[in-house]
Image (tube, grey):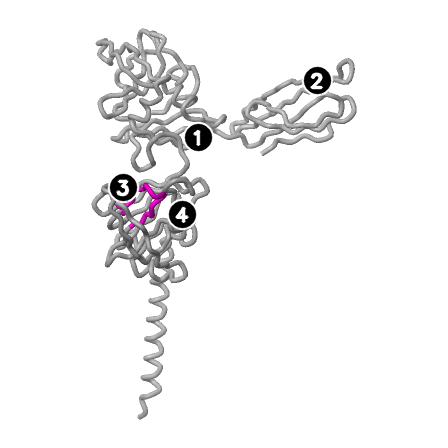
Amino acid sequence: MNLKPKRTFTILVLCIALSMFSMTAIADEFDCGCVGDATADTALLTIIGAVEKPGYFSQDGLRAYTDLIQTKTYNRRDHHGSEDVQTVTGIYLEDLLNVIMTLSPDAASITLTAGDGMKGDYYLDDDWLGVYSTDIDGNKMMLYFDGARLRLAVGRADADHNNRGIWMQNVVRIFVNVDSVGDATEETALLRITGAVEKPGFFSQGGLRAYTEFVQTKTYNRRDHHGSEDVQTVTGIYLEDLLNEIMTISPYAVSVTLTARDNMTDTYNLDDGWLGVYSTDIDSNKMMLYFDGVRLRLAVGRADADHNNRGIWMQDVVSIVVNAVFPVDVIPSAFVTKLNGNQNELNITVTELYPDDTIKTITTTTKINNNAAGVYDVGYYKVYVDTKGNVQIREIYIVE
């Protein structure tokens, strides 16, 4: 009995099964939604933050991008003035971030971290020591291969630049930071302000203290649920000033949610009602983030004589999220009132329709000439209006 056809069939089935298993493994790898050949646990280099997908790379994975690998010679100088040159092979940071990775449109800088915890921050621009800048030899910042590790090569920005000390050893992580307000990054911040804001805010305590025009010392009355009262004098920044002077919040912002390091949360409305951020207490104070050692705490005054406010003084505030409710539709309208001579009065109204059927209107009036056309500010909107003749509206729309 000839068994060869059966053996051939068995081998074929086994090969197909192994192939399907291999394809499934590859699919699972790509299902991670990341860039690179490694995982978060196995990567030699991790790239996260303001990126479309996180990047996890082994050294072989980086070496596979042969079209981006270059060999360059860098001039180095130490703080004693001693100079040398070093020829290295690797990938420009610019190519790594913009060709291999896909950055967020609001990416502004990167923080590199070495295996020993050393960090270095660089802007994504072509200014002094920017990632896209060139050194005196026409080179750019490079991650180069150094045995089993990755190192950062930074050229001399000018003839007097002592650059040797910033050649980072054993780079293991790149965090891409967004354009933001404040002196810190998303990773290093003591306080993070996100949500319905023009730009996120990342602050150290020193960064907040630097806003001296908003730092105040106030005395707050406190009362606990037993009726015991005391006073506390603190120094900090009113939440109102932090949100509206230092930050720029959305015109649709309605509340803020504060979170403490222990994950306790409280939400306060952005109004002057009961315990609203803009309300004043019985001593004419407002809610304040105040400095408490290396931490930030929330001071909330007594809304009235019977208010037990001590329990809502939040300790160690680390996050503020600005919440917003956006209109489902925005409709501009206008009419013209004829005046004497060649001038008219243009009345523009923007009507906002909200999910709960609330309707809000914003109106402005301005003098115009006959047949005027232009863009006009109506609250936080810009509205284009084209008039015809004395009182006709030819075209009207909101400018995005």
Which structural element holds mark 4? loop
Q: Position of residue 232 (x, y in %)?
A: 24, 12
Q: CA distance from mark 1 to mark 3?
A: 28 Å
Q: Which residue is mark 1?
A: 197
- Asked if labels 4 and 2 touch by Cβ distance under 8 angstroms, the answer is no
Measured along the vertical axis of the image, is residue 17 above or below residue 113? below
- Residue found 24% across the figure and 58% down from its top: 148
Assess whether mark 3 and mark 2 are in contact (beta carbons under 8 angstroms): no
Mark 4 highlights which residue?
134
Direction from residue 400 to residue 127 in the image, left or right: left
Task: Tell me which segment is drawn in magenta.
Answer: 152-167
* Amino acid bearing label 1: Val
For label 2, the residue is 345
Tell me which amino acid carries mark 3: Lys
Disc 2 from disc 4: Cα separation: 56 Å
N-terminal of the pair, mark 1 or mark 3, is 3
Magenta span: predominant SS is loop
- Residue 221 position within the rendered picture, expressed as x and y whole percent measured from the top left: 28, 9
The N terminus is located in which quarter? bottom left
Q: Is residue 347 above or below residue 327?
A: above
Query: Which x, y percent locates residue 22?
Result: 34, 67
Which label's residue is closer to the chain start, 4 or 1? Answer: 4
| Crowd class of label 2 (few under 14; some 14 to 19; many from 20; radius 10 Å) | some
Q: Which mark is residue 243?
A: none
Q: In this view of the protein, which residue sits in the foreground, 155 or 366?
A: 155
- Mark before the other along the chain sequence, 2 or 4: 4
Q: CA distance from mark 2 to mark 3?
A: 60 Å
